[in-house]
């Protein structure tokens, strides 16, 4: 737990430093819960940043399959994938995001990126979202 706390503290320091120097920041991390995302969103807001979230819409089974193609430190134990999937909470605009996108793997070479409307629960995503297909 201590190592995880140190990593989180280091990440916060690095993000704060980059934002203080006027740089854009991308945090490529699971951030599975509202509580995991809150410190980063708060930090971004403190520096007047635009907060953009990307939700990668994948089942645990799909993640395990992709993980199996990785090697070395990039590959994580399957139990970590299942633990993150169990904890996962969908991101919402109520957390402070300016924009939210859902990303889905369409086939082995394309992603579908859907901009989610501000209130997903009140409008069907298929009616209110814009979709783009981007090559990987």
Image (cartoon, helix red, strand yellow):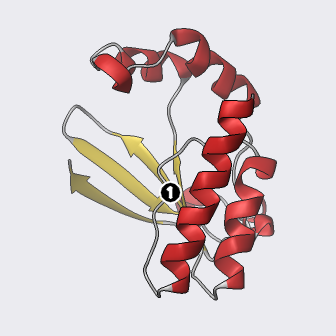
Q: Nearer the viewer, residue 76 or 51?
A: 76
For residue 35, side relative to residue 97 (left or right): right
Image quarter in which the N terminus is found: top right
Q: Is residue 9 visible?
A: yes
At x 73%, y 48%, the residue is 36
Q: Is residue 66 above or below residue 129?
A: above
Q: Quadrant of residue 73?
A: top left
Q: Is residue 132 above or below residue 21?
A: above
At x 65%, y 48%, the residue is 8
At x 67%, y 71%, the residue is 97
Q: Is residue 72 above or below residue 109?
A: above
Q: Nearer the viewer, residue 43 or 109?
A: 43
At x 60%, y 11%, the residue is 79
Q: Classify 10 Å Cα crowding around label 1: few (below 14), some (14-19), many (20 and above).
A: few
Q: Quadrant of residue 66?
A: top left
State the residue position of label 1. Answer: 27
Q: Is residue 80 above or below residue 133?
A: above
Residue 3 screen position, x and y as percent? 66, 32
Residue 40 screen position, x and y as percent? 67, 63
For residue 28, side relative to residue 128 (left or right): left
Residue 94 screen position, x and y as percent? 80, 67
Say which element carries label 1: loop
For residue 20, side relative to residue 97 (left or right): left
Residue 95 screen position, x and y as percent? 78, 65
Q: Nearer the viewer, residue 70 or 119?
A: 70
Q: Is residue 52 visible?
A: no
Q: Nearer the viewer, residue 32 or 105?
A: 32
């Amino acid at each position: 737990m201590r190592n995880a706390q140190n990593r989180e503290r280091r990440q916060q320091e690095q993000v704060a430093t980059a934002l203080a120097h006027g740089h854009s920041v991308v945090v490529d991390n699971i951030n599975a819960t509202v509580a995991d995302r809150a410190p980063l969103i708060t930090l971004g807001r403190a520096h007047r940043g635009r907060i953009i979230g990307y939700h990668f819409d994948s089942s645990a089974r799909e993640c395990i399959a992709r993980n199996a193609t990785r090697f070395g430190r990039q590959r994580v134990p399957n139990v970590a994938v299942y633990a993150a999937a169990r904890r996962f909470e969908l991101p919402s605009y109520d957390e402070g995001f300016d924009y939210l996108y859902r990303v889905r793997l369409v086939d082995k070479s394309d992603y579908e990126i859907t901009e989610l409307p501000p209130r997903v629960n009140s409008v069907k995503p298929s009616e209110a979202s814009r979709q783009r297909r981007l090559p990987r």
